[in-house]
Amino acid sequence: MAKGLMALTMLCVVFPLGAMALDISDLSGRWVVTWGNATHNDMTLDAGGNTLTGTYTNDAGRPCTVAGTFDPRTRRLTSELTCPLSVIGMQGVVSGDGQTVDGSYDFGGAASGAFRMEKQ
């Protein structure tokens, strides 16, 4: 086997294609957030530089602003949803394929729990 082909084969064994590093732009798009109480809400994210912005639709159907960051080394997503009467802090880890985020939220100290985001 040629030396270059052997090195490429070894690289694919060590780093399978699905394990490639995620980029913040991979998080752009439409998501559905499922909260611990099983309610579902839509969220749209846009990547710009090192930050994420977007819109979250709360239970009342009102738009909330989303501001967040993503660390590609740890795959940690941190975001804040600012709604008319509340702020929700979210921290989670993005799956290797970039299709889900699992984490926890804090609803202004009044409530907290788990969430899951799924890319649509």
Image: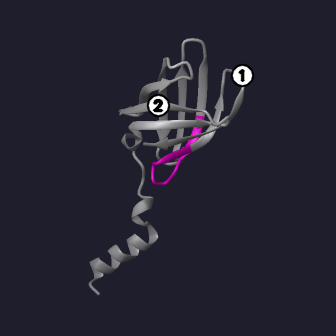
Along the viewing direction, whichever of 27 and 84 lies nearer the viewer: 84
Q: Residue furthest bottom?
A: 1
- Residue 6 versus residue 47: which sits nearer the camera? 47
Q: Amino acid at mark 1?
A: Gly
Q: How many marks?
A: 2
Q: Residue furthest top?
A: 85
Q: Nearer the viewer, residue 17 or 65?
A: 65
Q: Position of residue 105 (x, y in %)?
A: 64, 32
- What residue appears at the point 61 percent right and 33 percent down from the top-left corner? 39
Q: Position of residue 91 (x, y in %)?
A: 59, 36
Please determine whether, in this image, residue 93 is positioned above or below residue 54: below
Q: Which mark is residue 43?
A: 2
Question: Crowding near pointer 1: few (<14 within 10 Å), some, many (20+)?
Answer: few
Q: Which mark is residue 109?
A: 1
Of labels 2 and 1, the one closer to you: 2
Q: Residues within 10 Å of mark 2 (few under 14, many from 20)?
A: many
Q: CA distance from mark 2 to mark 1?
A: 22 Å
Kind of element beneath mark 2: strand
Quarter containing the C terminus:
top left
Quadrant of the image containing the N terminus: bottom left
Question: What is the three-letter code of the residue carrying label 2?
Answer: Met
Span highlighted in magenta in the image: 91-101
Percent x, y of residue 83: 54, 17
Q: Judge whether 18 appears above or below 65 on screen.
A: below
